[in-house]
Image (cartoon, rainbow, N blue to C red):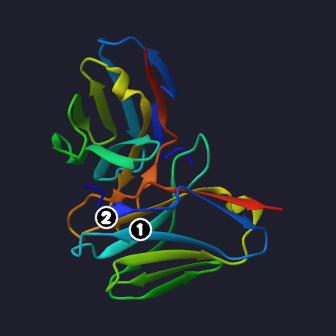
Amino acid sequence: DAGITQSPRHKVTETGTPVTLRCHQTENHRYMYWYRQDPGHGLRLIHYSYGVKDTDKGEVSDGYSVSRSKTEDFLLTLESATSSQTSVYFCAISEQAINYGYTFGSGTRLTVV
Amino acid sequence: DQQVKQNSPSLSVQEGRISILNCDYTNSMFDYFLWYKKYPAEGPTFLISISSIKDKNEDGRFTVFLNKSAKHLSLHIVPSQPGDSAVYFCAAIIQGAQKLVFGQGTRLTINP
């Protein structure tokens, strides 16, 4: 079920370089989210979108920006990557935002060296 | 400020026995709760949920209990099977707020 795909799946980048992660959905869901998963912290919300060009910050948004120019694509950009942004990044989609839960992508493992 | 807390990073249970995973929350405005299961190299998948108007919800081997006065929920898996070995995340939301808040996760290992 490829309703949501993330690319790339793995990436190694150098400190100070910009990085963009892509989330693509084929479900036409309104809501899209970017989370990061870190040991001891679980999943923390970076940014989310509630429609084309409508985005808002989550709890760990510093150093990240997002864009959603089409319903199906939600991009996460690390403007200048730092080692603290080494993490696994998950995109999620939802239509009703809650009752039936989110559908998550398979994740992007990002290493900043 | 961790609003949803899973205080046990790991849990080991024998196959066939009951697994009990716990979750505490601090925000009394949360009114819907969910459990997700995550295998390595995969995204989390929705498992079971409960509204704050209920105190129990069952789905096959999985039951979620909610104690609002204690701000505590638990996930019971009976009987536990090897395929249940995964990381389990508790999540909570204020309906209408559009954002799930997750706990730190508990790694469940089912031993044969």
**Label 2 sits on what residue type?**
Gln
Asked if the residue under mark 2 is in contact with the one under mark 1, i.e. CB atoms within 8 Å, the reply is yes
**Residue under circle 2?**
A96
**Residue under circle 1?**
A100
Query: B60 above or below B10?
Result: below
Instruction: Identify the residue shown where x is 48% and y is 66%.
Output: B35
Instruction: Identify the residue shown where x is 43% and y is 54%.
Output: B104
**Is residue A96 left or right of B109 when viewed as pictured?**
left
Q: Indicate the position of residue B57 as horizontal and vertical percent values.
A: 49, 84
Local secondary structure at mark 1 = loop
Query: B79 above or below A35?
Result: below
Label placed on residue A53: none
Q: Which of B85 and A23 is in front in this view?
A: B85
**Label 1 sits on what residue type?**
Tyr
Camera sees residue A99: no
Query: A58 above or below B46?
Result: above
Residue B33: which quarter of the image?
bottom left
Q: The numbered mark 1 sits on a residue in which chain?
A: A
Q: Indicate the position of residue B45 as horizontal and vertical percent values.
A: 52, 57
**Is residue A16 left or right of B36 when viewed as pictured?**
left
Q: Residues within 10 Å of mark 2 (few under 14, many from 20)?
A: some
**Is residue B110 left or right of B90 when viewed as pictured?**
right
Q: Residues within 10 Å of mark 1 (few under 14, many from 20)?
A: some
Local secondary structure at mark 2 = loop
Instruction: Identify the residue shown where x is 26% and y is 37%.
Output: A70
Q: Do labels 1 and 2 share a chain?
A: yes
Q: The numbered mark 2 sits on a residue in which chain?
A: A
Q: Residue furthest right?
A: B112
Q: Indicate the position of residue A97 as horizontal and vertical percent values.
A: 31, 61
Camera sees residue B55: yes
Q: How far apart are marks 1 and 2 (CA)?
A: 7 Å
Q: Name the quadrant of the C terminus of chain A.
A: top left
